[in-house]
C-alpha cells in the first residue's frame, strides 16, 4: 500500500524554536542554505551517508533521519561528501549532538569491487548509477574526517559496514585481519543490526545532557573500554573473545599462524552463538591497550513500530539535488535482499550437501531446488528456480564437488537464477573458513579455492549448458577426474566436441576478441610512445636549461622562433645603465 506524505502544519501558538522542531513534509536539509531557510539556529545531528539521500523508509539513512526528526531533533543529511571538501564537512557548523555515520545500504568494499577485486562498473545507490562516489571503507573514512573537523563531537557509526566490522575480522581486500571499526574509526559508539531504537535512545539521552561515555547498556551497541579503566570480570552474561593480537596471525611464523587461525575459528563460533537477543551475552575483545565491548543484539521491530515508521512524512523520492535518476528507486536494487548475502547463504547448503551427500541432496532439499524445464527440454533458456543463486568458489567446494553438483543440476532440472563468485564477507562463517582453511565444525583442514582460475572453472561448471563456457567446463571436468561427464549420453554435461555451427561461431568470436586485443595493444603502444616523446622533450629542455641558463638556448639572430634578446653587459648580470657605477667593469679595468 502506498503511503502519501502527511501534511504537518505548525500551530500558530508554537514559538519559533518549537516550530523548527516540527517534522516537515519536505526532504531534510542537505546544505547550509537549506538549514538557513528553515530558520534553524544550529543543527543537532549531521547524518552522513555513502549513498544518495533517498527520503524513503526502505533505505536506512532516510528512515533514520525521519525517526530522529520525529523525536524533535534538527537533522541535516550529508550525502556522499568528498573527503577533501572542507566546506562540505564544516558547512553546518559543529552539530550539537554529533555525527551519525553510515557507509550506506551495502558494504563499501562490496559496492566497489567484484570477487576477483575488479572495480564494478556502477553503483545503483548513486545518482546516474555512477561508481566511485564513496571512498573505500566509507564508514572508517567518514568517521576520521568528522573527527578531523570537530575533534570533540560525538561520532556514532551504524549500518551494514559497521555491523560486519564490530569485532576483529578478516578483510579479503587487504588479505589480513583488521581491527574493530570502533577502534580504527575512533568512534564514540557503534550500532549494529536493527539500529532504529538504539539510535533513538542514544540521541534522546545525549539531548538530555548525558555524556556519550555513559551510554554503555544499550542493546545493539558497542563501546570502547579505554586503557585507564579496569576490564570487567568474565561471567555467564559477559564473555571474552580471543584478542585481536591472538587472531591476527603471523605468516612468517607458521606455528604461531596455525594457533591464531584456530583461535579465529573459536572467535567466529562464539560470535555466532551470541546472535539471539534472548540468550546473547556481552562480548569483550581486547585490542592492544583498548578493548571493545559489544552488547547483545537489539530485538527486531514489531509490526506496530514498523507501521509507525512508515507513517512518517517521507516523500519517497530522492533529494532534488541528486539531479540524475537513482537506479535503486527503479527497482534495480533491493536493500532488503543483498545478492551476495543471499547467494552465499544458499551456497552454505550446497557446501554441506556436496561434502556430506556426494552427488545426492536430501529429498526435501532436492524438492525445493527442483525447477521445471523449459519447452525445449533444457538449456539456459529453460525454467529457473525462483530466487535460487549459486556461489562458485565457496569454501569446501573443489573441482569434484562443483562437478557433482553440476551433474545433479542436470539430473534434477535445477536452474539457478544467477551464478555469483564467492566473496568473503567480514564476520561471515564462510569467510572464517576461507581465511583459516579449517572446517568450523570439525576443525580439520578444508579445501579453499583461492586461485582465480579455479574459481572461474567452478563458475563455468554451473553454466555447463552455455556453449560459451564449453572449454572451461571441459577443463574443469578433467581437473575433477569426471571425464565420464563428457560424452553424448543422457548423463553427460557436455558433448565430446562442439557442433560445427557453434565452433564457427566461437571461432568468429575468437577472431573478434583477437582483433580487439590487437587494437588495444596498439593503442597502449601509441600511448607509451607519446609518453616517451614527452619525457625526451622534458629532459632535453632541462639539459638546455642547465647549459644555457634560464633562457634555455643561446641567441641566434637568424633564428625565426623569436626576437633577439636585450643586450647585456657581457657578464651575465643586468643590462648596463649609463650613469650608474658598474663594479664588475671597474674591477676588470684595474
Image (spheres, rainbow, N blue to C red):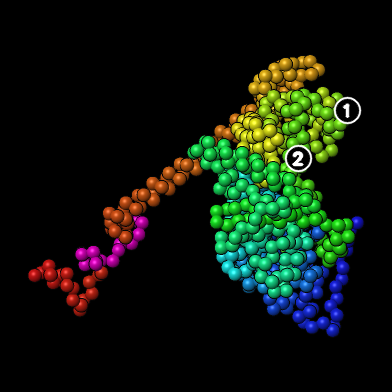
Q: Which mark is residue 207?
A: none
Residue 372 picture quarter: top right
Q: Which mark is residue 375?
A: 1
Separation of marks 2 and 1 at Cα, in angstroms: 30 Å
Query: Nearer the N terminus, badge 2 or badge 1?
Result: 2
Neighbor class of circle 1 (other Cα within 10 Å; few <14, some 14-19, many 20+) is few
Image quarter in which the C terminus is found: bottom left
- Span of residues in magenta: 559-573
Reply above or below: 79 against 353.
below
Residue 394 picture quarter: top right
Residue 249 picture quarter: top right
**Residue that sits furthest to the left in the current view:** 590
User: For this rendering, which residue is in front, 351 or 11?
Assistant: 351
- Dot 1 falls on a residue whose secondary structure is loop
Neighbor class of circle 2 (other Cα within 10 Å; few <14, some 14-19, many 20+) is some
What is the x, y in percent for residue 154? 64, 67
Q: Residue at x 20, y 64 (%)?
A: 570
Which residue is identified by label 2? 345
- The reply to whether callout 2 and callout 1 are in contact (CB within 8 Å) is no
Q: Residue at x 28, y 66 (%)?
A: 566
Within the magenta stretch, is there residue 568? yes
Judged by its main secondary structure, the magenta piece is loop
- Dot 2 falls on a residue whose secondary structure is helix
Q: Residue at x 72, y 72 (%)?
A: 207
371 left or right, relative to 395:
right
Amino acid at each position: 500500500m502506498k503511503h502519501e506524505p502527511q501534511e504537518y502544519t505548525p500551530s500558530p501558538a508554537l514559538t519559533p524554536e518549537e516550530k523548527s522542531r516540527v517534522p516537515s513534509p519536505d526532504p531534510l536539509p542537505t546544505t547550509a542554505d537549506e538549514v538557513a531557510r528553515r530558520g534553524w539556529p544550529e543543527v543537532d545531528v549531521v547524518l552522513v551517508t555513502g549513498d544518495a539521500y533517498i527520503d524513503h523508509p526502505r533505505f536506512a539513512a532516510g528512515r533514520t533521519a525521519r525517526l530522529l526528526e520525529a523525536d524533535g531533533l534538527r537533522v541535516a543529511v550529508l550525502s556522499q561528501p568528498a573527503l577533501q571538501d572542507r566546506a562540505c564537512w564544516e558547512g553546518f557548523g559543529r552539530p550539537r549532538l554529533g555525527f551519525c555515520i553510515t557507509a550506506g545500504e551495502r558494504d563499501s568494499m562490496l559496492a566497489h569491487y567484484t570477487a576477483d577485486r575488479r572495480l564494478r562498473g556502477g553503483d545503483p545507490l548513486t545518482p546516474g548509477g555512477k561508481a566511485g562516489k564513496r571512498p573505500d571503507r566509507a564508514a572508517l573514512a567518514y568517521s576520521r574526517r568528522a573527527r578531523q573537523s570537530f575533534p570533540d563531537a560525538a561520532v556514532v557509526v551504524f549500518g551494514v559496514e559497521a555491523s560486519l566490522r564490530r569485532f576483529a575480522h578478516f578483510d579479503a581486500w587487504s588479505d589480513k585481519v583488521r581491527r574493530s571499526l570502533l577502534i580504527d574509526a575512533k568512534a564514540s559508539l557503534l550500532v549494529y543490526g536493527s539500529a532504529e531504537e538504539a539510535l533513538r535512545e542514544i540521541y534522546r539521552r545525549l539531548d538530555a545532557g548525558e555524556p556519550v561515555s555513559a551510554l554503555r547498556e544499550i542493546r545493539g551497541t558497542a563501546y570502547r573500554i579505554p586503557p585507564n579503566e579496569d576490564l570487567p570480570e568474565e561471567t555467564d552474561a559477559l564473555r571474552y573473545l580471543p584478542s585481536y593480537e591472538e587472531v591476527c596471525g603471523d605468516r612468517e611464523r607458521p606455528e604461531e599462524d596455525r594457533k591464531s587461525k584456530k583461535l579465529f575459528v573459536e572467535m567466529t563460533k562464539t560470535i555466532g552463538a551470541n546472535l539471539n537477543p534472548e540468550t546473547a551475552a556481552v562480548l569483550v575483545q581486547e585490542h592492544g591497550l583498548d578493548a571493545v565491548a559489544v552488547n547483545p543484539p537489539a530485538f527486531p521491530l514489531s509490526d506496530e513500530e514498523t507501521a509507525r515508521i512508515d507513517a512518517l512524512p517521507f516523500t519517497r523520492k530522492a533529494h532534488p539535488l541528486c539531479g540524475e535518476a537513482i537506479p535503486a528507486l527503479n527497482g534495480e536494487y533491493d536493500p532488503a535482499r543483498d545478492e551476495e548475502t543471499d547467494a552465499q547463504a544458499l551456497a552454505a547448503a550446497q557446501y554441506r550437501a556436496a561434502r556430506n551427500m556426494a552427488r545426492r541432496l536430501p529429498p526435501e532439499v532436492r524438492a525445493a531446488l527442483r525447477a521445471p524445464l523449459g519447452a525445449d527440454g533444457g538449456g539456459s533458456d529453460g525454467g529457473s528456480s525462483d530466487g535460487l543463486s549459486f556461489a562458485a568458489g565457496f569454501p569446501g567446494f573443489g573441482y569434484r564437488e562443483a562437478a557433482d553438483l553440476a551433474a545433479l543440476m542436470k539430473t534434477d532440472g535445477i536452474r539457478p537464477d544467477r551464478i555469483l563468485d564467492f566473496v568473503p564477507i567480514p564476520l561471515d562463517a564462510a569467510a572464517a573458513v576461507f581465511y583459516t582453511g579449517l572446517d568450523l565444525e570439525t576443525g580439520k583442514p578444508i579445501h579453499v579455492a583461492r586461485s582465480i582460475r579455479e574459481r572461474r572453472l567452478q563458475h563455468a561448471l554451473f553454466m555447463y549448458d552455455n556453449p560459451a563456457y564449453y572449454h572451461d567446463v571441459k577443463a574443469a571436468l578433467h581437473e575433477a577426474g569426471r571425464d565420464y561427464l563428457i560424452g553424448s549420453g543422457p548423463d553427460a554435461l557436455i558433448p565430446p566436441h562442439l557442433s560445427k555451427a557453434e565452433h564457427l561461431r566461437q571461432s568468429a568470436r575468437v577472431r573478434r576478441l583477437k582483433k580487439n586485443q590487437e587494437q588495444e595493444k596498439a593503442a597502449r603502444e601509441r600511448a607509451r610512445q607519446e609518453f616517451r616523446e614527452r619525457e625526451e622533450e622534458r629532459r632535453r629542455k632541462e639539459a638546455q636549461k642547465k647549459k644555457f641558463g634560464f633562457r634555455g638556448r643561446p641567441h641566434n639572430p637568424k633564428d625565426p622562433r623569436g626576437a633577439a634578446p636585450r643586450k647585456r653587459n657581457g657578464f651575465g648580470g643586468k643590462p648596463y645603465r649609463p650613469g650608474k657605477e658598474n663594479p664588475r667593469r671597474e674591477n676588470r679595468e684595474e
